[in-house]
Image (cartoon, helix red, strand yellow):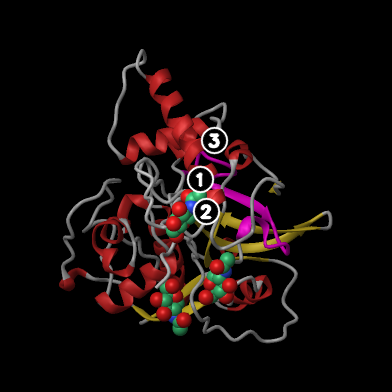
Amino acid sequence: MRAVLPLLCAAAWLLGAPALSLKKFHFKSWMVQHKKTYSSREYPHRMQTFASNWRKINAHNRRNHTFESTRAPLLHGWGREKHNCSATKSNYLRGRGPYPPSMDWRKKGNFVSPVKNQGACGSCWTFSTTGALESAVAIATGKMLSLAEQQLVDCAKDFNNHGCQGGLPSQAFEYILYNKGIMSEDTYPYQGKDGTCRFQPGKAIAFVKDVANITMNDEQAMVEAVALYNPVSFAFEVTDDFLMYRRGVYSSTSCHNTPDKVNHAVLAVGYGEDKGTPYWIVKNSWGSQWGMNGYFLIERGKNMCGLAACASYPIPLV
Ligand SMILES: *[C@@H]1O[C@H](CO)[C@@H](O)[C@H](O)[C@H]1NC(C)=O
Ligand SMILES: *[C@@H]1O[C@H](CO)[C@@H](O)[C@H](O)[C@H]1NC(C)=O
Ligand SMILES: *[C@@H]1O[C@H](CO)[C@@H](O)[C@H](O)[C@H]1NC(C)=O
């Protein structure tokens, strides 16, 4: 089986202002993941070493994409193996439309939970997952729950997820399905670091009946799913320029659009169009201070940064 990309998941506090360079950003992520701290005297030297290793690893990987056994000691999830976030087969059947020109689940009722903050853990995929399921349950029952990201961080490893080192929403939905449920934020609070699984079946409050995997690169199917059914979890590639996002429709020429490059998972809660530019309305997990009250807009219709590479949403069991 092909290794699936462990999304590293950029974290908000790593971004700072003004935005950090990507090198610094990767270095800080690496420090967090490996629990390193350096004195301010040591730091510049350590970062130089890291940057030089990083360049070598990337250069090596560019030369030899199939060489999987050279595991870069430094980087988890970056430039190491050939990854592919797409489901091997999709099970979403798209209709023909037409679809409404705009949609915003936040305005339809109490269907989108407040923006959360993943902190210094590469757990974006857990927030994308809980956000999608919280909406699914709210749409089906009218009840807004807050679900436990920490359970996914601690317990979903058998489904090819890696806690604070990344994971994928589609695989997390599968975990919740087979695990028979997920607990609440209150009974299994978020800690933002890897821990041992403390799932208690009696305290599960939300359940998954099925997982809809949208066909790779079928962005129109994402539109249909968001228009007709549910907010949709998706992944895309965060590059340097995204770290400077403040407002407006994000569009990039520096990111790629293939399933092997995505590194951040989020939740599409709607879409629209501004002066001829179609966009997605996206809930991030970097707190409500980031972007536009925790949200951003990204250009729609071009598979921007690979956003249509691996989209999915859960069908709740209610
Ligand atoms: C490329 O990978 C193969 C193994 O898959 C290895 O034998 C070969 O030496 C590698 N080449 C380079 C230039 O690293
Ligand atoms: C959906 O995606 C998940 C994770 O990639 C996978 O385990 C599951 O088999 C997929 N389902 C279908 C029906 O393809
Ligand atoms: C990724 O996986 C999908 C589904 O298995 C496949 O169709 C696609 O060609 C793969 N893409 C890459 C770049 O490996």
Q: In percent of the image, x 31 and y 72: which residue is there?
A: 175
**Which mark's residue is nearer the viewer, 1 or 3?**
1
* Residue 144 in sight from this viewpoint: yes
The first of marks 2 and 3 along the sequence is: 3
The three-letter code of the residue at mark 2 reads Asn
The image shows residue 36 at horizontal and vertical percentages of: 29, 31
Residue under label 2? 64
Establish whether ligand 1 lies closer than 8 Å to the Cβ of label 2: yes
* CA separation in Å, label 2 and label 1: 6 Å
Task: Answer with the quarter of the image where residue 225 lies.
Answer: bottom right
The three-letter code of the residue at mark 1 reads His
Residue under label 3? 22
* CA separation in Å, label 1 and label 3: 19 Å
The secondary structure type at the circle numbered 3 is: helix
* CA separation in Å, label 2 and label 3: 23 Å
Count numbered badges in the picture. Answer: 3
